[in-house]
Amino acid sequence: MTTDIAPVRRTRLLRTPAAGIVRHVLLIAASIVMIYPLLWMLASSFRPNDEIFSNPGIIPEGLDATNYLEGWNSLAHPFGRYLMNSAIVVLGCVLGNLLSCSLTAYAFARINFRFRAPLFAVMLVTIMIPVHVIVVPQYIMFNQLGWVNTFVPLVLPKFLATDAFFIFLMVQFIRSIPRELDEAARVDGLGHIGIFFRIILPLMLPALAATAIFTFINSWNEFFTALIYLTSPDMMTVPVALRSFLDVTAGSSYGPMFAMSIVSLLPVFFIFLFGQKYLVRGISTTGLK
Amino acid sequence: MSVLGELRRLRAGRAGRAAPRRRETAIGYLFLTPWLLGVVVITAVPMLASLYLAFTDYDLIRPPEWVGLDNVVAMLNDARLANSLRVTFTYVLVSVPLLLAFALLVAVLLDRKLRGLSFYRSIFYLPSLLGSSVAIAILWRQMFGRDGLINQVLAWFGVQGPSWISNPDTALGTIILLHVWTFGTPMLIFLAGLRQIPVMYYEAAQVDGASAFQRFTRITLPLLSPIIFFNLVLQIIGAFQSFTQAYVVSGGSGGPADSTMFYTMYLYQRGFAQLDMGYASALAWVLVLIIGAFTAVNFIASRFWVFYDD
């Protein structure tokens, strides 16, 4: 394909000024619809409760922190406790996925072991197994081990590479690293363990970054397993704590709820701001045929 | 290369290489130890255990009691289950096509050199990162309540909207809307796919006098069909497992009048609220069978509309 001249032709053949304007008008309108609820929640988090139900504007009148103070202190523990719980779980999940998935991916991408093809197929199929089929016996198992109301049921599976999607993402990435590098290292006397740690791992930084970011966001938002395993107020993560606002305030006091909701969205938002490159690349490369 | 492409390749038998040596196999399994442990302990054993429990009566306190097909019979006569199936099917069959249509439409609008592309892309992608959070579900609860944001905006136009979340006819619609709002991820995948279509196809078509619509239906759609298929399969599998949004928006009840009682919520209620673990296991396996059937039908149907040029 003649990529070097394609953009020039593109502009000449496919675009007219009028079509361009229509496109931008459509996109801007859609952007506003998409983003308005978020901006409105942000503005409302600084408003008294009655105004949340009467002011649809997104220009904040001031930075009244009342809701934030009230929200921070209206559950069994200060909200910081739940943030800390979530941080521990997220850290464990990210670490677990980085370690276990990269080891597994290296084996599938670079080591020629027996039954590789069938095991690889098993790995791909596990991506599609719904969590609900295993959650009941898993709960029974973790319950008997006395791990309910600990973070173990949320974190341990990540150290056992159960997020097969990331294995797949890393396999794809490792395959794109030239094999000549492995060969050269092997000539220098490195085995698979040396090649993995010294050659492949440093080169697959973009795939590790994508995995870390996706795992961060997924485990930060994780609700279903947290709801099942973390029932004591001491152990609640942010999503479960946020949900319990609905019980405490009978679901009517939106000011404090919005304030803590904003707090809970901030980490994901910042990750999105700074890690977008890896997110987009990660999705784009695993989504293609 | 997607998961599905990979599976196709494996089936076609192109994955095999030279026979492995024993040392390679040993070191391979060393690397695989955590994963193998996970597959056995976290996935396979619980799956088999839940298959067994599906034929028992079990409340976590007394040991499981074998009841044969009692759970299956009970399921056939369970009106709430039938209702939750109806709710879930409606949700999946309405929200997934809508979501994919939006994703494709916006991706096509964003394709080719466009001023502000990365800005638009960020705006459209952000909701899919936040959409599965409890915070957004709380926002939705307010927005679609009686005096929520939606009705405040409607009031400008002199329309007095109902309380969308407490009306059984509209509650499910608000959750479908929330799901459609998160079209960003498939949109990114479509965008990447569109980049791979050679520009010269479009140029040739234009020289031949094809309209924009014809170029879309005759070039874009066929060449993008493997990616549409990939998104369709994964989105359907994902949508069947939706839980958080309906749970939070309905305040944990699946109401009003069970109108947002998703299959997963019913499973949660039976298993973890009523401690009816045997019945919940049976429900879980039926969900697997449903998802498996949908995926199989998808794969079979794909032979008639997915175009592979490799």
Image: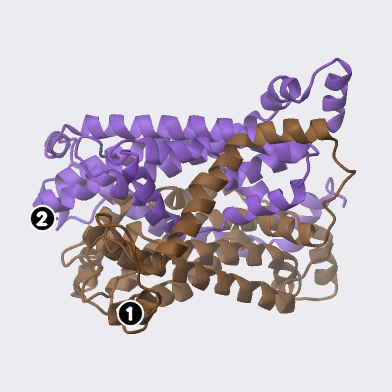
Q: Is residue B208 above or below residue A177?
A: below
Q: Chain of mark 1?
A: B
Q: Amino acid at mark 1?
A: Ala
Name the residue rendered at 52%, 67% in the picture: B236
Give the chain coloured purple. A
Determine which quarter of the picture holds residue B53: bottom left
Specify whether residue A244 is in view: yes
Disc number placed over residue A250 in the picture, else none: 2
Is A193 on the left-hand or right-hand side of A219?
A: right
Q: Chain of mark 2?
A: A
Kindly give the residue lying farthest to the top in the view shown. A188
Disc 2 is placed on an element classified as loop
Q: Nearer the viewer, residue A190 or B39?
A: B39
Residue A202 percent across, percent down from the top left: 68, 23
Q: Nearer the viewer, residue B58 or A264?
A: B58
Give the chain coloured brown. B
Determine which quarter of the picture holds residue B300: bottom right
Disc number placed over residue B74 in the picture, else none: 1
Distance from label 1 to label 2 (Cα)? 35 Å
Disc number placed over residue A76 in the picture, else none: none
Name the residue rendered at 30%, 41% in the picture: A148
Residue B129 percent across, percent down from the top left: 44, 48
Q: Is residue A227 above or below residue A26?
A: above
Residue B111 percent across, percent down from the top left: 65, 56
Q: Is residue A109 above or below residue B168?
A: above
Graded by Cα atoms within 10 Å as few (under 14), some (14 to 19) or many (20 or more), the crowding at tag 2 reads few
Is B248 on the left-hand or right-hand side of B93?
A: left
Specify whether residue B97 is in view: no
Name the residue rendered at 78%, 76% in the picture: B210
Q: Amino acid at mark 2?
A: Ala
